Amino acid sequence: MTSELLPDWDRIVDRHARRVFGVAFRILGSVHDAEDVSQDVFAEAYRLHRSGPVQSWAGLLVRLATLRSLDRLRRQRPAAELRELDRVSAVEPLQELMASELSHWLRGAISQLPDQQATVFTMQYFEHLSRDDIAVTLAVSPEAVSTALYKARERLMSQFVVYNQGAQE
């Protein structure tokens, strides 16, 4: 392979590392896991580039970060909790507990979504991308983005109703 066909990896990493890490962290909620996923994503992107040209680095990297983070969530590796004295928070303990529980539930619920729905939901709500930006990034139509987002919301809402009923009992 000639040097003209090889991308400038330092530039690609510099340009996209923060976003890749951010996607992974928001899905996983762990710095350590997000760092591991980020490394995996760039290694996988390099391998994919060697098999053919990449149309959109941002699209490829965000999609890989989402999918690999979801894969990691699905494996549900137990994580050590911080001791109460290790945490500093200005939020009331009950609010913090409820937010933590809801965050844990949402991560689990997103991991149960089909990949396309999970990716679109993540890009919309964690990355704050518009429908058109998501469509361009994933190389799909804006209508496909809307459909996937609608299905993801419906599925999450039905799971939340079940979760909420269980919590009230």
Image (tube, grey):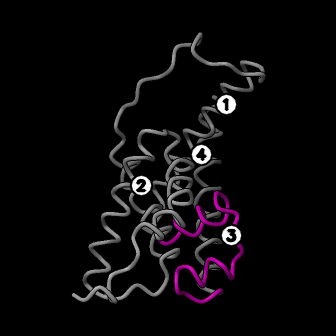
Mark-to-mark CA distance, 4 and 2:
33 Å
For marks 2 and 1, give the CA distance: 38 Å
Q: Is residue 1 visible?
A: yes
Residue sitting at x 52%, y 67%: 119
User: Residue at left 60%, top 32%?
Assistant: 101
Q: Which residue is mark 1?
A: 168
Q: Which residue is painted at 37% across and 62% down in the image?
A: 41
Q: Which residue is mark 3?
A: 129
Look at discs 4 and 2 and give the one toward the viewer: 2
Label 2, label 3: how many angstroms apart (C-alpha)? 20 Å
Q: Which residue is mark 4?
A: 162
| Other residues around mark 1 within 10 Å, as few (<14) / some (14–19) / many (≥20) | few
Crowding around mark 2 (Cα neighbors within 10 Å: few <14, some 14 to 19, many 20+) is: many
As helix, strand or loop, the secondary structure at mark 2 comes to helix
Q: Which residues are magenta?
A: 115-142
User: Pointer 2: what residue?
Assistant: 38
Label 4 Cα crowd, 10 Å radius (few <14 / some 14-19 / many 20+): few
Q: Which amino acid type corresponds to the residue marked 3 in the rendered image?
A: Leu
The mark closer to the camera, 3 or 4, is 3
